[in-house]
Amino acid sequence: FIQAMDDWSFRKPDQHVFCNILHQLAQSGIKPKECVYVSDTILDFKCTKARGLISVSVLTGVFNEHDFIKAGQKKENILNSIADLPDWVGKYNRA
């Protein structure tokens, strides 16, 4: 399932932007707690936080670690690169 910006009437930071995709995932038996949203913006992080979703912030954009922490992201959910995601998933699954 692919959801593009023009496919849905809601826009970030409105947390309802995730309703359609979460509905599609639920149809496949996938729960929100089984998903991770990966992004490099504060806006995306705030949107996922408002929806109660698990998110990982990647430092490949204009925001730094301090920016994400100040916004409320957990330090352990901030990665230098998307290449670090497999290690994060491994640690998260053991937690």
Image (cartoon, rainbow, N blue to C red):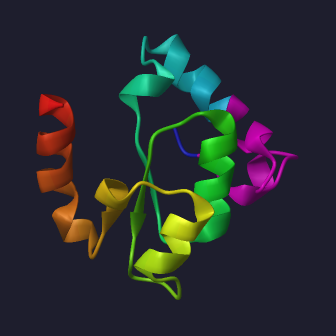
Residue plotted at (61% across, 68% down): 42
Q: Is residue 33 left or right of residue 27?
A: left
* 16 in magenta: yes
Magenta residue span = 3-19
Q: Which quarter of the image is occupied by the C terminus?
A: top left
- Residue 63 lies, with reference to residue 25, above or below; the image says below
Query: What residue is at 21 percent from the left and 38 percent from the top?
Result: 92
Question: Which of the pair 83/66 is nearer the observer?
Answer: 66
Q: Is residue 10 left or right of residue 39?
A: right
Report if residue 6 lies within the magenta region.
yes
Viewer-side residue, 16 vs 28: 16
- Place of residue 36 in the rendered image (x, y in percent of width and height, measured from the top left): 40, 42
Task: Name the residue nearer the viewer: 13 or 25.
Answer: 13
Task: Name the residue located 35 percent from the left edge and 55 percent from the top edge.
Answer: 77
The x, y position of residue 76, in whole percent, is: 29, 56
- Number of marks in picture: 0
Where residue 78 sits, quadrant-wise, is bottom left
Seen in the picture, residue 79 relative to 93 is either above or below; the reply is below
Is 34 situated left or right of 21 in this image?
left
Q: Position of residue 72 (x, y in %)?
A: 56, 57
Q: Report the residue at 61% width, 64% height from top.
A: 71
Indicate the position of residue 20 as horizontal and vertical percent values: 69, 31
Q: Tell which residue pokes out farthest to the bottom in this image.
A: 62
Left or right of 1, for residue 29: left
Q: Is residue 27 above or below residue 23?
A: above
